[in-house]
Image (cartoon, coloured by chain):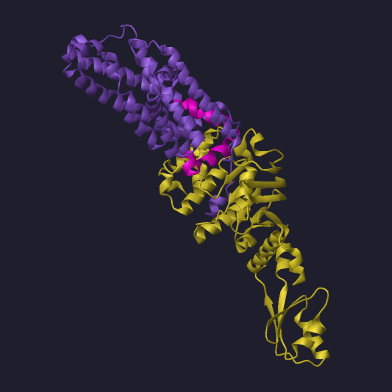
Chain colours: A yellow, B purple
Amino acid sequence: MIEAHCLTKRYGSKTAVEDLSFTVRPGIVTGFLGPNGAGKSTTMRLILGLDAPTAGHVTVNGRPYAMHEAPLREVGAMLEARAIHTGRTAYHHLLALAATTGIPRQRVNEVIDLVGLREVASKRAGGFSLGMGQRLGIASALLGDPATVILDEPVNGLDPEGIRWIRNLLKSLAGEGRTVFVSSHLMSEMALTAEHLVVIGRGRLIADTSVEEFTRSAARTVVRVRCPDIDRLKGLLAGPDVTLTACAPYTLEVVGLTTDQIGYTAADHGLTLLELSPQRISLEEAFMELTRDAVEYRSTAAGEPVAARSAS
Amino acid sequence: MTTILTRPLGATVRPGKVTLLRVLRSEWIKLRTVRSTSITLLTAVAAMVGLGMLVTHLRAGDLNAREVAHFNGAEVSLSMYRPAQLAVGVLGVLMFTGEYSTGMIHATLTAVPRRLPMLVAKAAVFTGVVLVLMTAASFAAYFGGQAVLSSTHAHLSTHLSDPGVTRVVFGTALYLTVVGLFGVALGAIIRSSAGAIATLVGILLVLPGLGALLPADWAQHIDPYLPSNAGQAVLSVVPDPAMAPWTGLSLFAGYAAALLGLAAWLLKRRDA
């Protein structure tokens, strides 16, 4: 369980995370989503106490991370920057980390086998490929058999086999009742692995919702309509929950009405339709739309000339 | 892959509390599993013993009567602490900068989030390893140097029981260890190898040179108290009247302790 309350982090004049509150629950995979530079890594550093928040606080399993007596037992983390001394072998890297909480050698060998690094365990980590580095990072994260697992962009640099392995690993960790918090900038990846989503943009919370809910709201259908008398059709379709966008001559994109409703309305008023086609918005597009909105919202809030805008 | 996955995690794991002893063990593993440790320490030992004997041989070669009066076989045999201090200092610096430059510091601080035990453990492990090794190297350099002298210039060689000699031999090891601790502290404070090594060289070698440029009546009040001048007071067989040997070394260690204190404060306070 991770609970963030009104987290704010500023580096000089730059605000990386602003007033961020969310809860990550055990037993499910929670995706932490946002475009590059949204503040995902910063938030993870705040959770682990690597950086101190400017305001607000965050607890892991009920306490600030640093207050736990056996921190590796509480949280296993892999941050985006590879946290490995390039001159040390994978085995010794894990052994040194394990020693801090008295984790036995046997467990070190166990996680090496688990992530599939047996053959290169005695090689220096500096020569590892990106994918091998990720696997070693995941081995470090699992070393203490932690109740909470935090992984920053774990699929980066992995081959398809590795990506599938991560997906299964995350699900099985959550299935064992652990809290799993995984960041990504790829909506499609999260749609496959996560059950819950925390979405941020420019350091602010945009959505804290289940993947199911997000998919349902995002996968609303857009209907494309082409009609010679488009202005009249526009008047007939307009309504409180309906969005109409002119996208080409005589062509509208309608959100909020089904193809049936549009077809009957047109027939009732004797209008000829040249095209009536439903188009699905992909999750990725929905995600981009969501984060773009947040960016716009933010620049207005930061003191843009709002009056000039509403006048135009 | 899937068969491994379905195996329950953590059948063998029962991690306990983070204790200073465990962090010490972790830092000991870290220190002995990177190449820079053996490279810098071998360099230091080779300089102390190998160069020490060579220099003793060369310096004793042709001395006139006046030079013989000023020649001290113990000091000359240990004089290669000068290059050795750079090697030891670099190892000290790398204790921290090796972690900051590679990102390892994140893993370390995630394992030891209270941070200070990690600094204490690094300094302790470093002190233990370097003190033991440099004591051995100092004795080796001393005996090696005396062996060179007794084979060619027996009248110049000294004995451990001569006044001040044992102090200088142990003092050399202690001086080198404190130099290394300066490096540890500077590495933690500055976080970059280049910056920390440059600062260490500045403190050890450049500062005394600048002190020498001061007007004479200032210099006598400042020069003996500069870090490396104070530390090197323990390396004179005949004590310097301006600074007693152990007082000087204590002052030198005090500077290092102050820097380590600053490092601790910054480590606790700064973002990693």
Regarding residue B22, the answer to whether it shows in the image is no
Q: Residue B115: within the magenta?
A: yes
Left/right of residue A180 with respect to residue A122 in the rendered view: right
Does residue A238 lie above or below B165 as drawn?
Answer: below
Q: Position of residue B142 (x, y in %)?
A: 29, 17
Q: Quick one: B141 or A30, which is closer to the camera?
A: B141
Residue sitting at x 48%, y 49%: A133
Left/right of residue A257 with respect to residue B257 in the rendered view: right
Helix, strand or loop: magenta stretch: helix
Residue sitting at x 36%, y 16%: B235
Q: Residue B272: within the magenta?
A: no
Q: Position of residue B33 (x, y in %)?
A: 42, 36
Does residue B46 lie above or below B142 as drawn?
Answer: below
Quadrant placement of the N terminus of chain A: top right
Q: Position of residue A183 (x, y in %)?
A: 61, 54
Does residue A279 lie above or below B190 as drawn?
Answer: below
Regarding residue B156, the answer to whether it shows in the image is yes
Quadrant placement of the C terminus of chain A: bottom right
Left/right of residue B135 with respect to residue A291 in the rendered view: left
Report the span colored magenta: B98-126
